[in-house]
């Protein structure tokens, strides 16, 4: 039974999310601030963390940064919960290693779907077939879950890694946002196009010069192709 920690200072939201998760069979720990959360981590490491950005004292982005810099915690999937919708906050969260985010007010059914999707991706074995994927200076080792771009190692979130693999497996093919949503997010709910766009933006930045090979096809989606095309 997966254990999920919800770090949210709004008690009504925290209780609503916790109630919904327990109803789906999850074990849940709810915390209103960083200190309580850190204390719980000393006892049990969760399978996933729901993390609000705006918290009293230490904010969610600082907590996320500490999680990603800790050896025993760095691979815990994190979904950010925030009322902020600015591009800066979304990109900053993704750059720090968030696997997904939802903006308030959010639907409980959509949140549950995203949680299931993230948990499936963190647990499913690597698909059989080619383990090394490469294109234009980008090399992905699916078995080792490592990425290099232009000869340098690149640290990606789980979702960014899945997105890059999907693009590499379909290089040269124009992929619609709906196709990307189904393949990478595995969600039956229609997502804001900004969610995909922000992950693409973050992925391009992390890949450096090689990121330019992720081409935008206006009105449709994205394609992995020659940087000069």
Image (cartoon, grey):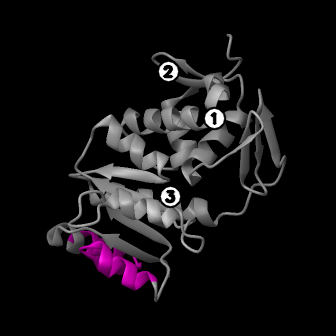
In this view, 121 is above or below 176: below
Q: Secondary structure at mark 1?
A: helix
Q: Main secondary structure of the magenta part?
A: helix
| Position of 198 relative to 17 (above/below) | above
- Check disc 2 and report the residue beneath it: 220
Q: Residue at x 68, y 11 (%)?
A: 228
Query: Gap in Å between the C-alphas at discs 2 and 1?
Result: 23 Å
Left-right relation of 40 to 135: left
Report, in whole angstroms, how far the alpha carbon at label 3 lies from the one at label 2: 24 Å
x, y (%) of residue 101? 38, 51
Q: Nearer the viewer, mark 2 or mark 1?
A: 1
Task: Using the rendered image of the protein, determine whether residue 78 is visible from the camera's viewpoint.
Answer: yes
Image quarter of the C terminus: top right
Report whether residue 190 is seen.
no
N-terminal label among 3 and 2: 3
Instruction: Pick whichever of labels 2 and 1 is earlier in the sequence.
Output: 1
Residue at point 15%, 70% (across, down): 12
Give the x, y percent position of residue 35: 31, 78
Q: Which residue position is annotated with label 3? A: 117
Residue stretch in magenta:
16-41
Q: Is residue 21 magenta?
A: yes
User: How many marks do you count on the picture?
Assistant: 3
Crowd around label 3: few <14 · some 14–19 · many ≥20 (10 Å): some
Q: Secondary structure at mark 3?
A: helix
Q: Earlier in the sequence, mark 1 or mark 3?
A: 3
Instruction: Find the residue positioned furthest to the bottom.
Output: 43
């Amino acid at each position: 039974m997966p254990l999920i920690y919800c770090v949210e200072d709004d008690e009504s939201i925290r209780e609503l999310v916790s109630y919904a998760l327990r109803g789906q069979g999850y074990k849940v720990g709810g915390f209103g601030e960083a200190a309580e959360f850190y204390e719980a981590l000393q006892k049990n490491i969760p399978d996933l963390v729901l993390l609000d950005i705006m918290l009293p004292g230490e904010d969610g982005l600082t907590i996320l940064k500490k999680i990603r810099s800790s050896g025993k915690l760095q691979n815990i999937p994190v979904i950010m919960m925030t009322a902020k919708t600015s591009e800066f906050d979304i990109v900053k969260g993704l750059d720090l290693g968030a696997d997904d985010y939802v903006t308030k007010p959010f639907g409980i059914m959509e949140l549950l779907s995203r949680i299931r999707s993230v948990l499936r991706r963190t647990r499913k074995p690597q698909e059989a077939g080619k383990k090394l994927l490469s294109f234009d200076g980008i090399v992905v080792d699916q078995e080792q879950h490592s990425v290099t771009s232009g000869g340098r190692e690149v640290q990606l979130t789980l979702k960014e890694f899945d997105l890059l693999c999907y693009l590499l497996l379909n290089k040269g093919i124009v992929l619609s946002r709906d196709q990307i949503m189904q393949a990478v997010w595995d969600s039956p709910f229609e997502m804001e196009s900004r969610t995909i766009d922000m992950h693409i933006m973050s992925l391009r930045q992390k890949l450096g010069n090689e990121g330019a090979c992720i081409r935008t096809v206006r009105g449709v989606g994205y394609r992995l192709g020659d940087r000069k095309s």
